[in-house]
Image: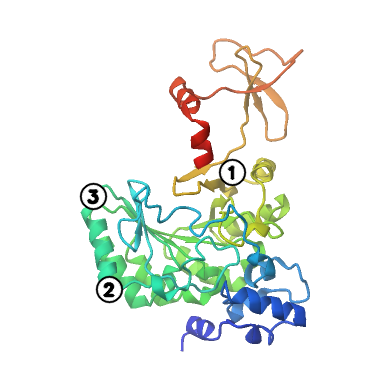
């Protein structure tokens, strides 16, 4: 039996199984049983071995083991926080698809996961049999992609696409690869984290056939990049498959500049490009992981100048309701109010900048005020003015 399948078969799914790995008080047992009635648990033996069982606040423990706080559902939390299925937008033409951007489509080939993340934004469907696709539904989804020539990229998401068999992955990839309008394929997976043994030589040989193909991993903490994980990631990069990583900003796990710096250096060392750092979505029962946007932007600002630019991910907000992703960048451009552009260096120093080369900027003297540089066009400003109080309340 393949090692990754052994890990899957022996995954910890019940509180009684969890007791074999970690000491739990009667109170903890009772709470875990209560949480697992609503939100399921699944942890591979491999990942359990990475957890420091003597540390109640171990980040990897918080990422994997249920917490009673998950039952504290907030008013603003949503079953579908990023609007995968927003009927008003009509962005789910088929059960297996979300078509939000004209040139990209999300494909959900399976709801199964290698483990259940405690911060999951799709916990409404992860591991649920009712979201399992039939052959007919997959065929219908593939036909939709084939019929819509504006689509350039197919993004496999889930669930976890790598929970499918090699044969099934090969079959779906082959069907998409034959569509001439598709430029590239992207596979989003947390299997390199939960169960890196899934990255077998056979799977890599399948993926290699369908390049250009990108694999996006989901490492949230530097300790998740174990020697085993890196060894299996190397199989991909050694075969020309580029790797990206998207993390989520999580309280008590990676909400410090030091941990983010360590994580992104570890990714770069493993030949994985830090791609996205997501603001936590508003899914049910995960608000105890929430970090404010202000703090997140401050952390990204502090990373600038202390780590190479290619090692800094885009800080991203997925707008609730299905309205798309936006980058949240610290604004380094300012003005004195009289037309002079003032730039802030990565080290917090203000410097004058003339938007042209006809004259040399004077030194900054007697500077009374500094304003954010006005960057909005008249048309954009008019749209802001047209937003009514009713619109703001609706959203």
Residue of label 2: 135
Q: Residue at x 45, y 68 (%)?
A: 160
Q: Is residue 141 left or right of residue 302?
A: left
Which of pointers 2 and 3 indicates the residue nearer the eye? 2
| Mark-to-mark CA distance, 3 and 1 | 35 Å
Q: Residue at x 45, y 76 (%)?
A: 200
Q: Is residue 7 left or right of residue 302?
A: left
* Towards the viewer: 211 or 316: 316
Residue of label 3: 149
Which colouring convention does the figure follow?
rainbow
Residue occupying the far bottom of the picture: 1
Where is residue 123? Give x, y as percent: 52, 66
Q: Which numbered disc flags the more N-terminal residue, 2 or 3?
A: 2
Q: Can the viewer see residue 179 in this picture?
A: no
| Mark-to-mark CA distance, 1 and 2 | 44 Å
* Label 1: which secondary element: helix
Q: Residue at x 52, y 71 (%)?
A: 232
- Badge 2 crowding class, 10 Å Cα cut-off, few under 14, some 14 to 19, many 20 or more, is few
Whether label 1 touches label 2, CB < 8 Å: no
Residue occupying the far front of the picture: 390
Q: Which numbered disc flags the more N-terminal residue, 3 or 1?
A: 3
Compared with 18, 232 (above or below) is: above
Compared with 162, 87 (above or below) is: above
Q: Is residue 30 left or right of residue 78?
A: right
* Towards the viewer: 277 or 230: 277
Which of pointers 3 and 1 indicates the residue nearer the eye? 3
Q: Is residue 140 left or right of residue 27?
A: left
| Mark-to-mark CA distance, 2 and 3 | 23 Å
In the picture, the disc for residue 309 is 1
* Label 2: which secondary element: helix
- Badge 3 crowding class, 10 Å Cα cut-off, few under 14, some 14 to 19, many 20 or more, is some
């Amino acid at each position: 039996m393949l090692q990754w399948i052994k890990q899957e078969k022996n995954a910890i799914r019940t509180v009684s199984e969890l007791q074999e790995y970690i000491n739990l008080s009667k109170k903890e047992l009772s709470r875990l049983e209560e949480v697992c009635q609503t939100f399921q648990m699944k942890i591979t033996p491999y990942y359990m071995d990475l957890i420091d069982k003597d540390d109640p606040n171990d980040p990897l423990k918080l990422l994997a083991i249920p917490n009673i706080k998950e039952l504290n559902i907030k008013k603003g939390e949503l079953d579908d926080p990023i609007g995968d299925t927003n009927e008003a937008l009509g962005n789910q033409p088929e059960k297996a698809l979300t078509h939000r951007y004209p040139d990209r489509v999300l494909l959900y080939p399976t709801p199964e996961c290698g483990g259940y993340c405690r911060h999951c934004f799709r916990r409404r469907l992860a591991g649920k049999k009712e979201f399992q696709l039939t052959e007919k539904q997959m065929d219908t989804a593939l036909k939709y992609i084939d019929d819509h020539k504006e689509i350039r990229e197919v993004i496999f998401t889930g669930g976890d696409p790598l929970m499918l068999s090699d044969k099934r992955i090969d079959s779906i990839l082959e069907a998409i690869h034959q569509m001439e309008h598709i430029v590239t394929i992207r596979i989003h997976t947390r299997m390199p984290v939960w169960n890196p043994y899934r990255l077998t030589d056979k799977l890599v040989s399948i993926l290699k056939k369908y390049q250009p193909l990108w694999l996006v991993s989901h490492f949230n903490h530097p300790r998740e990049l174990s020697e085993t994980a890196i060894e299996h990631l190397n199989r991909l990069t050694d075969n020309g498959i580029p790797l990206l990583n998207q993390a989520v900003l999580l309280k008590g796990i990676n909400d410090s500049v030091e941990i983010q710096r360590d994580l992104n250096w570890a990714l770069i060392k493993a030949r994985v490009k830090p791609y996205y750092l997501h603001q936590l979505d508003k899914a049910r029962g995960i608000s105890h992981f929430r970090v404010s946007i202000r703090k997140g932007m401050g952390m990204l600002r502090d990373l600038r100048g202390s780590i190479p630019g290619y090692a800094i991910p885009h800080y991203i907000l997925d707008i609730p309701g299905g309205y798309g992703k936006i980058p949240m960048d610290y604004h380094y451009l300012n003005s004195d109010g009289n037309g002079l552009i003032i730039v802030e260096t990565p080290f917090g120093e203000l410097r004058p900048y003339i938007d042209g080369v006809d004259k040399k900027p004077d030194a900054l003297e007697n500077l009374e005020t500094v304003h954010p540089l006005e960057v909005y066009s008249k048309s954009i400003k008019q749209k802001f003015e047209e937003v009514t109080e009713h619109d703001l309340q609706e959203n």
